[in-house]
Image: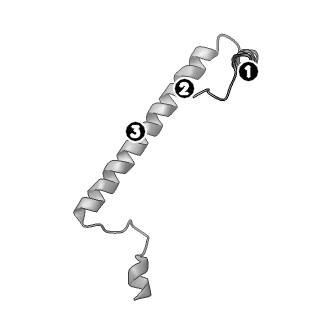
Amino acid sequence: MFAFLDPPEIILIVVVVLVLFGGSQLPKLAKNLGKAQQEFKSGLTEGQKEAEKEKLAGGSTPTGSTDINKTLE
């Protein structure tokens, strides 16, 4: 993940984050980032499940969109 960053650059980023947010705010920040990541993943999973259901139900187009093949015919 951090293949493009050298150790001194990572240390600099950590120091800047500590200065900006303070040591007492870092656990709250990490907790909120974890919740955001979890919500994002669950949203992706839910979207994939809905797309799979639509695909199995007959491949209808999403609400509000039109099928370009039908329009061209």
Name the residue type under label 2.
Asn
Image-quadrant location for residue 46: top left
Q: Residue at x 67, y 10 (%)?
A: 23
In the displayed orientation, state which residue is furthest to the top. Answer: 23
Quarter of the image with the N terminus in it: top right
Q: How is the image coloured?
A: one colour
Residue denoted by label 2: 32
Q: Residue at x 27, y 56 (%)?
A: 53
Image-quadrant location for residue 29: top right
Q: Please tell me how crowded label 1 is: few (under 14), some (14-19), or many (20+) other residues with Cα within 10 Å.
A: few
Name the residue type under label 1.
Glu
Instruction: Say left or right for 2 vs 37.
Output: right
Mark nearer the N terminus (1 vs 2): 1
Secondary element at image label 3: helix
Residue 20: percent from left, percent from top: 75, 20
Secondary element at image label 2: helix
Q: Residue at x 47, y 39 (%)?
A: 40
Which of label 1 and label 3 is nearer to you?
1
Residue denoted by label 1: 9
Name the residue type under label 3.
Ser
Name above or below for residue 31 compared with residue 39. above
Residue at mark 2 to residue at mark 3: CA–CA distance:
15 Å
Instruction: Determine whether label 2 and label 3 are within 8 Å by CB.
Output: no
Question: How many labels sit on residues?
Answer: 3
Instruction: Say left or right for 30 vs 11.
Output: left
Residue denoted by label 3: 42
Mark nearer the N terminus (1 vs 3): 1
